[in-house]
């Protein structure tokens, strides 16, 4: 799938790793609080969720599509979880499974509509985003669930490794590992990638492309629900506005991480490790900018610029690799 | 002195791994219809792309009205009065006929707005030249293909094009529509003074309307601007195919079992095939021959479950079955299909050699929980990549970096690795250099000797005659006849031609 | 020759007009209050700026792209427009010009970067969405500008004579007309649609793709700017969150109006009717005291339905013409 290890130095991921290290060095020298126990813990919680959101988008970008309903699915899953635990009194563990099931189901609906109608997933998920979010607000009457079981909320504030790291981060890293395993070492993962890269060729080679695309959407919904669970334990409540209007606040981290990480927007090429580093980079920069008093309002501006630079760099790299192909 | 409006002088063009054109020349007389002929892969399409500014030649000259010109973009070609007439591709389907004709230079009212009355008026003139009795406000997508094509010609005329390139213009026209087209072509040559380059596989059309002929073979001229009067059908075929073409005599002994492995009985498909019946025996190679548009690739796609079979029976090893997807074709019935369109349907260009070669075997080699590693894959697939002598620095090389011939080998390798019983091979050697071509021919014979039954789709007559045991001739989505192949070129090709033109 | 009646039935907007009339009559019969002067006024006010937002997206759909930053441009212009008037006491006409210039520049940037980089407009406008929104928040620090000149406020409130027609709707109606002329009767407009139909054919004809794409984005930015300023007139203040909720309706109206996202098929009148349908039904939901969040579900369902219908019609048209070539 990837090139051999000696070539690692030339990969996008290596460049990202260097950038991450550079930014860590800069921020830890320039600012005071960056390496404080409090800040690192806070960072680890934010990074954990951003990684999960990025992965959720990545698996749909793999098909050459998009999932704008990501945030809406997340919020729906979280609110459903809140209802299960608070109103219905279902214990934490079964509730978590129900939440994940809910996310997967909503992803499945996206996938089914996309595959059966052949309409681009952009417009499908734009519509379902609105539908999911509207249904959720109607059913919950826009009320938050704030009395969640303590076992559930404590997980979010738990501190590990001399109180530096949140267990949420470990969960995200484990998910990265699982996805890496899926795409690298299983036949399904390879089929997902092949279907995304060239649906016609994949279909003729005996892969059910439609099934694969639905799997991607289900997986995306599942990961969005994971992110939602993590966010809920972090803030200790399930709130309808936890991902902003229509859940659209999640879209920026969702696109930033995979795009910076080298996932091809036209589908068929992804990097789990790259997406993870992308999320780390974005969180680092956001956090660093806060600490050097850029003002929270300018941060979006910088993130937009970063996204722009990332895609432009990606394009130039593509240009040069293409050129070298022609020369060789 | 005769005037040449277009002259191609010793043009060379090479692509990685293939020399597409080798000092190819031809001269187009003003006011004539000139046939450009050649087998698939002879360099016709490359030459057309050079004339229309899509490719640039490596060497040689291109002269328009005796002045040397450089064409960098398709736009340049249009500017110098060269237009390509595609069947329907160049029209904006949702626009009206009139607007399409005038789109480069829309007439305006005094307010600077588009003047639709003037469009109707001006375009009517060009439509009348083409004997098209349609309202200029008709939307293009409502026209038949034949009329769209005539509109394209009208549009080219409206651009004051002096040279028209018609590439297989009759491939989806009915006989009456074709005759009508020819009459009009003769008329515009006479009345409008345009010159036409005519590319076709159908020789009777060439004799019908062309004045001169240029034949390309393996990128070289087999004849240059020869008058049609000096040629007959036989000579022309000889020029196109050439004497030096070796007919590889298949020395293999057909398997003695004579066991029928696949049988089609009166199959009708969603795509329009009518009453297709044939048998495929174990270790047999049957050829599907026909002109472009005969429905051969479509039949293959129906067989592997990509399109629907409406009635009739498909029998595999004695049991009637339904194949609903390529996946079940592969996994349940061990049928594989090697696509003619390597880049779009055959390979995943952004992936590497090993991933492409192993795509069909992942399900077969997976362990518990779908566990698959690169090592497991390469131990399964490498023997085939080596057997096929795929030239690549590493199996982790991107497939798009390989030459066309090696790419084709990889797309064959994945089906060898899958271990199919029935393999449908669609135009395996189009655009492939001669050495690899010979190698692939040898491979197909070896495969059959090993017990695989093969359906070979090819428009390459020598290829067909050297490989197939029986040749099924298709025309208009019907099976016209079956020719027993005794590998004697002259008699077999004559028999095939009879079925095509009856 | 065709009969005029049947060609009328083929038009995208004809079916929509029937829907508008039927739904209007139906609602009016159930709740006569629907036709009250006040209600009509509210309806027209919401139609006014939604119309411009929809057209701003429509022109990008025409060339087969999307513009996610319509709302961000509108928001940035809205706060700049109100900001320069409050902070620098700049006169209204100059402030309007500043607003239009900002919108145009934003649109130009979108188009220019898209053309030069060759990256899909989706991702470019996603990036510029956050850039424009970031500038907006950076300037305002999330605080609205309240000091809007009386002339602007009056314009936002006034009605024509004693009729329920708001002044606000005048400009959108004129612009809709101009857009219709542009898309149907100017060479640039026709070339845009040709480009949206088939980039390849358009280039073969000699249509400059960079000119088409940049022009479309510039117009889109210009229209987003007008929409932003109209909203300021209506709200009587310039809040930074103007534009945040425009994305969905901006796609809804053109798609309901039969636009195809692959490009090349948009209809100005049908888009306008799409806006009207969305407005009428949203208004009806208010009158029937249905949960306001239902509007969102309804919008989503409408988009999906419209996409299905468009696709079905396209499919029917194509399949009746299907021919077999490409052996």
Image (cartoon, coloured by chain):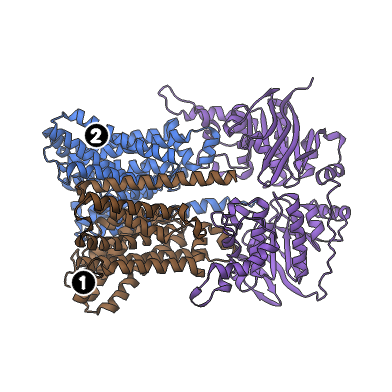
Chain colours: A brown, B purple, C blue
Frontmost residue, B336 versus A174 = A174
Q: Position of residue B248 (x, y in %)?
A: 83, 57
Q: Chain of mark 2?
A: C
For the question of whether residue C126 can be seen, the reply is no
Specify the label residue B306 is tagged with.
none
Query: Which residue position is annotated with label 1?
Result: A153
Q: How many marks?
A: 2
Name the quadrant of the N terminus of chain C: top right
- Eyeballing the image, is B477 above or below C119? below
Q: Secondary structure at mark 1?
A: helix
Location of residue C134 (image quadrant): top left
Q: Position of residue A317 (x, y in %)?
A: 46, 46
From the viewer's perspective, tell me whether residue B433 is left or right of residue A312: right
Query: Which residue position is annotated with label 2?
Result: C99
- Counting other residues with Cα less than 10 Å from the Cα at mark 2, is it few (<14), some (14-19), or many (20 or more)? many
- Counting other residues with Cα less than 10 Å from the Cα at mark 1, is it few (<14), some (14-19), or many (20 or more)? many
Q: Position of residue A171 (x, y in %)?
A: 32, 69
Q: Secondary structure at mark 2?
A: helix
Q: Position of residue A154 (x, y in %)?
A: 20, 73
Kindly indicate whether the residue at mark 1 contacts the one at mark 2 (C-beta within 8 angstroms): no
Frontmost residue, B394 versus B350 = B394
């Amino acid at each position: 799938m990837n090139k051999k290890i000696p070539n690692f130095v030339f990969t996008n991921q290596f460049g990202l790793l260097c950038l991450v290290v550079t930014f860590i060095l800069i921020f830890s020298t320039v600012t005071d609080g960056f390496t404080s126990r409090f800040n690192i813990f806070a960072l680890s919680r934010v990074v954990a969720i951003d990684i999960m959101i990025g992965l959720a988008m990545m698996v749909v970008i793999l098909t050459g599509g998009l999932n704008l309903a990501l945030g809406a699915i997340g919020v729906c899953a979280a609110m459903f979880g809140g209802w299960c635990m608070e109103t219905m009194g279902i214990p934490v563990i079964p509730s978590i499974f129900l939440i994940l099931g809910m996310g997967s189901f909503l992803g499945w609906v996206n996938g089914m509509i996309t595959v059966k109608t052949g309409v681009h997933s952009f417009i499908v998920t734009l519509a379902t985003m609105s539908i999911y979010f509207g249904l959720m607000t109607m059913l919950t009457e826009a009320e938050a669930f704030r009395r969640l079981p303590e076992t559930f909320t404590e997980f979010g504030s738990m501190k590990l490794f001399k109180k530096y790291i949140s267990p949420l981060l470990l969960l995200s890293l484990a998910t990265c590992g699982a996805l890496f395993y899926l795409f690298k070492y299983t036949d399904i993962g390879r089929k997902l990638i092949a279907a995304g890269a060239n649906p016609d060729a994949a279909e003729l080679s005996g892969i059910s492309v439609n099934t694969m695309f639905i799997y991607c959407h289900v997986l995306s919904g599942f990961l969005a629900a994971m992110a939602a669970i993590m966010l809920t334990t972090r803030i200790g409540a399930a709130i309808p506005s936890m991902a902003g209007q229509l859940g659209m606040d999640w879209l920026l981290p969702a696109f930033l991480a995979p795009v910076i990480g080298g996932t091809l927007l036209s589908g068929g090429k992804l990097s789990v490790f790259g997406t993870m580093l992308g999320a780390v980079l974005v969180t680092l920069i956001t956090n660093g900018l806060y600490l050097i008093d850029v003002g929270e309002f300018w941060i979006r501006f910088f993130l937009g610029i970063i996204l722009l630079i990332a895609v432009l760099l990606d394009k130039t790299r593509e240009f040069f690799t293409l050129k070298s192909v022609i020369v060789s | 002195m005769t005037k040449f409006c277009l002259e191609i002088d010793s043009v060379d063009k090479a692509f990685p791994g293939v020399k597409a054109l080798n000092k190819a020349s031809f001269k187009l007389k003003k006011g004539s219809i000139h046939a450009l002929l050649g087998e698939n892969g002879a360099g016709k399409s490359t030459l057309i792309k050079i004339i229309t500014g899509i490719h640039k030649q490596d060497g040689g000259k291109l002269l328009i009205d005796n002045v040397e010109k450089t064409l960098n973009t398709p736009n340049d070609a249009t500017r110098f009065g060269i237009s390509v007439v595609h069947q329907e591709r160049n029209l904006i389907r949702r626009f009206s006929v009139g607007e399409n004709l005038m789109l480069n230079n829309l007439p305006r009212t005094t307010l600077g707005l588009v003047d639709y009355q003037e469009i109707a008026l001006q375009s009517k003139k060009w439509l009348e030249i083409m004997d098209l009795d349609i309202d200029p406000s008709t939307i293009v997508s409502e026209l038949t293909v034949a009329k769209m094509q005539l509109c394209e010609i009208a549009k080219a005329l409206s651009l004051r094009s002096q040279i028209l390139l018609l590439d297989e213009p009759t491939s989806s026209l009915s006989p009456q529509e074709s005759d009508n087209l020819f009459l009009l072509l003769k008329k515009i040559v006479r009345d409008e003074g345009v010159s036409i380059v005519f590319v076709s596989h159908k020789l009777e059309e060439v004799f019908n309307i062309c004045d001169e002929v240029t034949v390309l073979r393996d990128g070289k001229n087999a004849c240059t601007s020869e008058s049609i009067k000096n040629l007959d059908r036989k000579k022309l075929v000889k020029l196109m195919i050439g004497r030096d073409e070796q007919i590889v005599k298949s020395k293999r002994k057909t398997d003695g079992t004579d066991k029928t492995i696949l049988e089609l009985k009166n199959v009708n498909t969603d795509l329009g095939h009518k009453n297709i019946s044939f048998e495929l025996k174990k270790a047999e190679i049957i050829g599907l021959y026909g002109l472009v548009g005969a429905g051969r690739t479509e039949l293959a796609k129906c067989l592997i479950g990509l399109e629907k079979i409406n009635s009739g029976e498909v029998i595999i090893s004695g049991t009637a079955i339904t194949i609903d997807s390529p996946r079940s074709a592969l996994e349940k019935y061990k049928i594989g299909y090697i696509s003619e369109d390597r880049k779009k349907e055959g390979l995943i260009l952004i992936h590497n050699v090993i991933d492409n070669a192993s795509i069909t075997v992942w399900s077969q080699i997976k362990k518990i929980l779908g566990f698959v590693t690169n090592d497991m894959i390469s131990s399964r697939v490498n023997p085939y990549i080596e057997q096929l002598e795929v030239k690549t620095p590493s199996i982790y090389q991107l497939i798009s970096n390989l030459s066309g011939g090696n790419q084709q080998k990889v797309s064959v390798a994945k089906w060898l690795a899958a271990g199919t019983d029935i393999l449908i091979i669609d135009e395996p050697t189009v655009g492939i250099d001669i050495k690899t071509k010979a190698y692939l021919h040898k491979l197909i014979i070896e495969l059959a000797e090993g017990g695989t039954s093969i359906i070979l789709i090819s428009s390459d007559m020598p290829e067909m005659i050297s490989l197939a045991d029986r040749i099924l001739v298709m025309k208009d989505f019907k099976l016209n006849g079956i020719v027993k192949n005794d590998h004697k070129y002259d008699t077999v090709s004559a028999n095939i031609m009879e079925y095509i033109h009856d | 020759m065709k009969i005029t009646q049947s060609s009328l039935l083929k038009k995208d907007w004809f079916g929509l007009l029937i829907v508008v009339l039927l739904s209007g009559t139906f609602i009016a019969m159930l709740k006569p209050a629907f036709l009250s002067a006040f209600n009509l006024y509210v309806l027209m006010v919401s139609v006014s700026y939604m119309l411009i937002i929809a057209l701003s997206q429509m022109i990008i759909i025409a060339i087969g792209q999307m513009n996610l930053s319509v709302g961000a441009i509108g928001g940035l212009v809205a706060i700049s427009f109100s900001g320069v008037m409050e902070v620098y006491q700049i006169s209204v006409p100059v402030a309007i010009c500043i607003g239009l210039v900002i919108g145009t520049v934003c649109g130009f940037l979108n188009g220019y970067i898209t053309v030069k980089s060759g990256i899909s407009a989706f991702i470019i406008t996603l990036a510029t969405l956050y850039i424009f929104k970031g500038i907006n928040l950076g300037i305002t620090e999330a605080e609205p500008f309240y000091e809007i000149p009386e002339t602007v406020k009056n314009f936002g409130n006034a009605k024509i004579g004693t009729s329920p027609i708001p002044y606000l709707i005048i400009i959108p109606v004129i612009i809709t007309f101009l857009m219709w002329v542009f898309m149907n009767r100017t060479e640039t407009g026709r070339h845009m649609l040709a480009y949206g139909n088939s980039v390849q054919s358009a280039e073969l004809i000699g249509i400059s793709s960079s000119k088409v794409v940049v022009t479309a984005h510039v117009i889109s930015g210009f229209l987003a700017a007008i929409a932003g300023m109209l909203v300021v007139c209506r709200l009587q203040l310039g809040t930074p969150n103007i534009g945040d909720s425009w994305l969905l309706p901006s796609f809804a109206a053109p798609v309901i109006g039969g636009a195809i996202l692959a490009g090349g098929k948009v209809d100005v009148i049908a888009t306008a009717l799409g806006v009207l349908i969305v407005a009428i039904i949203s208004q009806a939901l208010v009158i029937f005291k249905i949960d306001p969040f239902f509007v969102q579900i309804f919008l989503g369902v409408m988009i999906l339905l419209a996409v299905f219908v468009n696709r079905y019609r396209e499919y029917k048209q194509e399949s009746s013409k299907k021919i077999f070539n490409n052996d």
